[in-house]
Amino acid sequence: MGRGRAPCCDKVGLNKGAWTSEEDTKLVAFIHKHGRGNWRALPKQAGLLRCGKSCRLRWINYLRPDIKRGNFTEEEEETIIRLHEQLGNRWSKIASCLPGRTDNEIKNLWNTHLKRRLGAKQTGSSRAHSSCGKVGDEQHHKQESINESSSSSSCISSSESHVAPRVTCSGPHDETKNRCIEDCSIEPEVWGVVMDEFSFFVPPYVGPMAEGVHRSTATTSEEKATREIEDDGWLAYLEEELQL
DNA sequence: AAGAACGCCAACCGCACACCG
DNA sequence: CCGGTGTGCGGTTGGCGTTCT
């Protein structure tokens, strides 16, 4: 499947490259108003000369209100390293367990800092995780993809000698962890790693629209009203950030 | 001071999966 | 069941800023 299909959008006449603050505002305003719907149709409706994919990426990696900006803490880096040992290059999985961080961000961090740092470490020490770490990652990941397609089991089941039952995260119920609970289905071992690391996490900016991503879950009119007020706050915040 | 080399990160590309008619 | 379409993911790249020579 997927081969030979038409490109996601007609790229003729579409903007590429860096986003302008105007485009950002348009996108945020649109999503603020209508929520995340059809990405392909979104740019047209929002008056953006971008392809839907580009809009989605921009939203997820940059404009989303619950994005955590700034440097990664050491704890976060350790978490990433440990999750990477368990999951391989499945950045979205790793990201789903690091609230406020995007897969792209983590991927970049890994490729720039962590890989190098780990390489330096590993040259000195024995490779305890040779079956699960960077060595043979490619094949490992491919193999896991195959496994996952049928059973949704993660690399843990192959790197460990037993097959861990798939579970949905069911950690604590505070605000910052809900994302993980909602987003990821991970094995208990991974959850353990996450929980070990999450004691440090304090949301830097749980923006007014932080829940907006999950707006579809809003049910009562009270909740909706509150959310609208929050959304306005977020929009104002964003406009300020973008110096508009 | 200027150019080269390097590092970082936002964004793009193509593939694969999920869903729907 | 099958084909088409939308979405998500991971790899890669381009461009900009910083550091080095």
Image (tube, coloured by chain):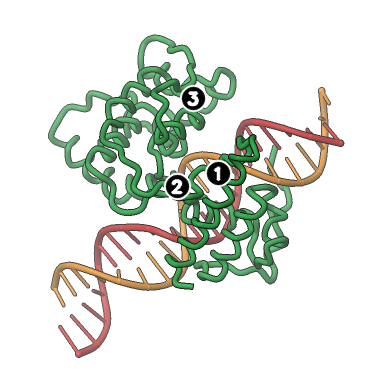
Chain colours: A green, B red, C orange
Question: Which numbered circle lies on residue A66?
Answer: 2
For residue A105, above or below residue A18: above
Q: Which residue is mark 3?
A: A185
Label 1: which secondary element: helix
Read off the chain for label 3.
A
On the image, which quarter does residue A11 sit in? bottom right
Which percent across, then down, holds residue A79?
29, 34
> x, y (%) of residue A221?
65, 40
SS label for mark 3 = loop
Q: Is residue A236 above or below residue A53?
A: below
Query: Does label 3 or label 1 sit earlier along the sequence?
Result: 3
Classify mark 2: helix, strand or loop: loop
Asked whether, in this view, residue A21 is left or right of residue A15, the answer is left
The nearer-to-camera label among 3 and 2 is 2
Q: Amino acid at mark 3?
A: Ser
Q: Which mark is residue A55?
A: none
- Please state which amino acid type lies under the numbered disc 1: Val
